[in-house]
Image (cartoon, rainbow, N blue to C red):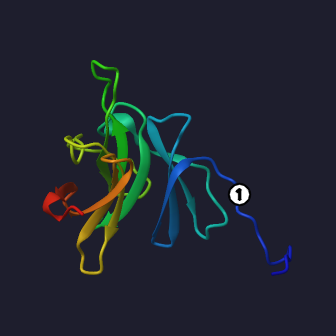
Amino acid sequence: YRYDADTSYQNPIIYGADPDIMYHNGMYYLYFTDTQDMQLFQCYTSPDLVHWSEPQVVFHGEDGWGFNEYMSPNVIYKDGLFYMFYSSHTLRDENNKRKAFISYATSKSPLGPFKSELKLPLHSDIQEIGGHPFIDEDGRCYLTVVRFNHGNEIWAFEIKMENGIVTPLDDTLV
């Protein structure tokens, strides 16, 4: 490959961690963890993956479940709603330990504001982070997560996403 300044470009270096990108109606949405203020998520937009907007806030921690360090926003569109899955922590316990869990928030717009009516984690009995959604060709929805059983383990299970409510189908866990 020969570099040619007239036909080549270089993407800008943009700020953020835990990126997730979604394409919807001709626009790319790049969601990320703001490591300077882990109480919110922001989003860049681009029509072409080359030219990017300034980031804008799409989620505030007080609008969802969790107490600090909101991480790993992953967004998917289904039946007129955008579902944002994310990780956060509990308050510190008597041993000064926190636990990480996955929750979700919804919006009618890919730019939010994302809010959670239930403000609960998907599972409260086992720690998990991540929360990357996938919709199969048959319309069934799945979520991949990381659990800390014997180190980091990747798990997947089917979820029901209906009318802004996400229900894990735990009997499908693999």
Q: Going 21% across and 46% down the picture, which residue do you hit?
A: 123
Quadrant showing the N terminus: bottom right
Q: Quadrant of the C terminus?
A: bottom left
Q: Is residue 170 left or right of residue 93?
A: left
84 relative position to 17: left or right: left
Q: Is residue 116 above or below residue 132?
A: above
Of 93 and 37, nearer the camera is 93
What residue is drawn where x is 30% and y is 52%?
A: 106
> Based on the displayed image, in which of its 4 quarters is residue 125 positioned?
top left
Residue 120 at least partly seen: yes
Q: Residue at x 39, y 58 (%)?
A: 75
Q: Which residue is mark 1?
A: 12
Farthest residue toward the left? 171
Q: Amino acid at mark 1?
A: Pro
The image position of residue 146, as x and y in percent, is 35, 52
Helix, strand or loop at label 1? It is loop
Q: Position of residue 81 (x, y in %)?
A: 30, 61
Mark 1: few/some/many CA within 10 Å (<14, 14-19, 20+):
few
- What is the total number of numbered labels drawn onto the structure image? 1
Residue 67 drawn above or below residue 96: below
